[in-house]
Amino acid sequence: MRIVLAMTAALVLFLTLAGIGAGQQPVTITYWQYFFESKVKLVDQLIKEFEAQNPGIRVVHENFPYDAYNQKVASAVPAGQGPDVINLFYGWVPLYVDSRYLQPLPADAFPPAEIEREFVPMIKNSKFDGKYWALPTAVRSLALFYNADLLRAVGFTRPPVTWDEFAVAAEQTTVRDAAGRITTEGFGVAPAGQDHHLIREVLFRQWGVAPYSADGRRVTYATPQGAEALKWYTDLITQRKVGVIEFFPGGGGYRNAFMAGRAAMIFDGSFAIGSIRGGTKAAWGVAPLPRRTLGGEPSNFGSYWVHGLTVRAQGPRRDAAIKFLKYLVSDAVQRLWLERVGELPASRKLVGDARLSADPIYGPFIQGLSYARATFFVDETAQRQVLVDAVNEVVVNNKSPLQALQEAAVKEQKILDEFWAKRARK
Amino acid sequence: MVTRAPSAGLVLPQIRLGTRRALWAYTFLLVPLLFFLTIRLAPAFSSLYISLHEWNIISPDKPFVGLQNFRTLRDDPRFARAAVNTVRYVLAGIPAQIALGLALALMLQRINRFRGLFRALYFMPFVTPIVATAWVWQWMYSQNFGPLNQILVALGLPAQPFLRSPGQALYAVAAAVVWQYLGFQVVIFLAGLEAIPRVYYEAAEVDGASGWRLFRHITVPLLNPTLVFSVVYSTIVYLQLFTQVLNMTFQDQGGPLAGTLTVVLYVYQLGFQRFKMGEAAAATAVLFVVILAITLLQMRVLSKPVEY
């Protein structure tokens, strides 16, 4: 008797609660990103605001260590679990599309013409198979970090603007000991750091060579001009001797050397601002990447993380996910992202904002965005290795830059061919 | 004769006490066995299975490709380079480690004071985290700031590129590995030397033998089991070299120009940086076969039973 009573009571309670909820069924969507403290904190706050604006939607925010991120996605999505909105590196988009994890952005909610009008040009690289699959909140670009104290000591009151000036400044700031070994680099060289991007998207282009064909299928840098560009870079190490590879050991050795006042200039991404700001004692500044001549063509390398809709987002969840995605890439969120995370806005309007581009630190990076290109990588690790090896072939093995580039082009073409051949089979 | 069960309450009085003890032992051994099967053996076999597939971590399609991954590796110059390098590590590292280890053990055996202290000092690198020592060694080898080059320059010799030279880098890494394992080697040899009865030496000395002949005809043959263990164990260590190489060449891992790349480091790059699990598993399978073959060969050739 008692059991029957208890069960009835439970049933009544359940029906009452269910009845309350039935009025406005909330939709719950899930957002995934890898763990990066400032991003996680900001997204938590953004979700609160978004939920306040959209009472029917609840967003669950989950994050994983960077190293395990892809595995998590790969095990969750095919099992029908995982996120509705997902954060991924732009270079992974082809892989995610081919694996059928992403759905194309609906053209009515995100018209392609509008995307191309509103976002910085480099996001064209997220267009794959003729469709947009994902959009960024923030982007990154490269700039020249300089130690103002060291430059001033040799008479440079402003950072170099042309490559010739850069070379002179590097030569004058280099300090050697009695045995001829460098104790302070004029230029903190780092082929495996950001310099391989610099060679690919900046030096090649400014020396008149497009590194790849427009469709991204062919390697086109192995030309005499390409070799000139590579030689200009390797000469800094072998002829002018203004820097040595792995001057400071470790992944960010060139950056550590700069922070320790042991490198007068380095090329680094906007993501380095935080560490450099925290760890540099000398007066330092940021300048746009040098050009070949004063009025010459500027170029830059950009990269970014994007938010996409997964195939899991269907029905009401898809509508909610679209709303959340629109919110994430809105100008208001982009501004907050710059303030809190230190990543550059992806919107042309913000890039054109005079106040933002006048910022002494972020300004040079933001100016670079209007012409930055994101390389279409199919296997970034292997492609980076190819260019790092080309530099070493010249610096360590005394190969001619043209021969080193020709060998590099053969190796990289093989990587591209393999990717496209696999796609064609699918 | 049937042993009576000590307690009448037991259901299986027929089982002998010895058998019952053995059964219990097996029961308890079953637990680690289960662990071994699921955590070690099953993944090993699944990696053989993966090696026959095109296995991208992300992609849900993992088609069977037969021996394609092995053919790709055969034609991959980086894999060939990694394999040759790995053999070089073995050939350079093991003789150096065994010779130095034996020399130190013989000297330590002669002293009585501070033997424990010396042993502890030599053993210390072995218990220091590999990553930490690798980073310290990277600074030691630094072209511009490293103490090794400071010494060379002070002696009027030219500074060496060490880790920046494709020719020297491999041996520079091998030297650091030898240093790390030296203490372990010394301890193993010391134990082996202690196990050789003094009477053999005394008898030989009475017969007029000394120095080199004692070492050649008594120490070496009777130390043989220890030597075999050392060679087999360190071969496996050098064939699986990874952490030291990764951390000592952190910017250009396995570089410069693949000069320090090992098979295991290449497996890691293929599988976890380039998402090519199939090829990575195939390389692992090749390494497994090579380690097995070398180990069997070493056991066959090196272990000669010595009777005195």
Image (cartoon, rainbow, N blue to C red):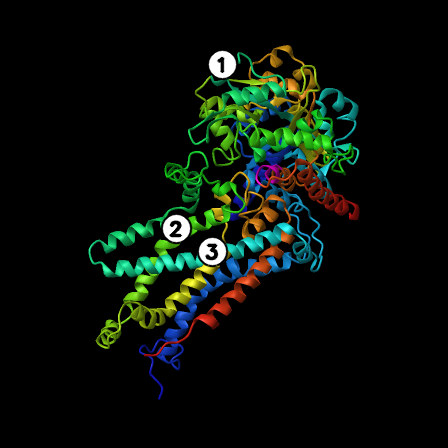
Residue A346, position in %: x, y? 66, 22
Instruction: Identify residue for label 3.
Output: B92
* Label number found at residue A152: 1
The outermost residue toward the front is B156
| Residue A105 position by quadrant | top right
Residue A6, position in %: x, y? 52, 44
Between marks 2 and 1 in the image, the one whose residue lies nearer the viewer: 1
Magenta span: predominant SS is helix
Q: Please determine whether, in this image, residue A137 is positioned above or below residue B226.
A: above
Chain to which the residue tagged by mark 2 belongs: B
Instruction: Identify residue for label 2.
Output: B179
Residue B154, position in %: x, y? 37, 36
Crowding around mark 2 (Cα neighbors within 10 Å: few <14, some 14 to 19, many 20+) is: many
Q: Please determine whether, in this image, residue A413 is positioned above or below residue A289.
A: below
Instruction: Identify the magenta region.
Output: A391-396
Label 3 residue SS: helix
Q: Looking at the picture, do discs 1 and 3 lie on one chain? A: no
- How far apart in space, not on screen, are marks 3 and 2 (Cα)? 13 Å
- How far apart in space, not on screen, are marks 1 and 3 (Cα)? 50 Å
Is A74 in front, or is B129?
A: B129
* Number of on-image labels: 3
Is B278 in front, or is A259?
A: A259
Label 1 residue SS: helix
Q: Looking at the picture, do discs 3 and 2 lie on one chain? A: yes
Amino acid type of disc 2? Trp
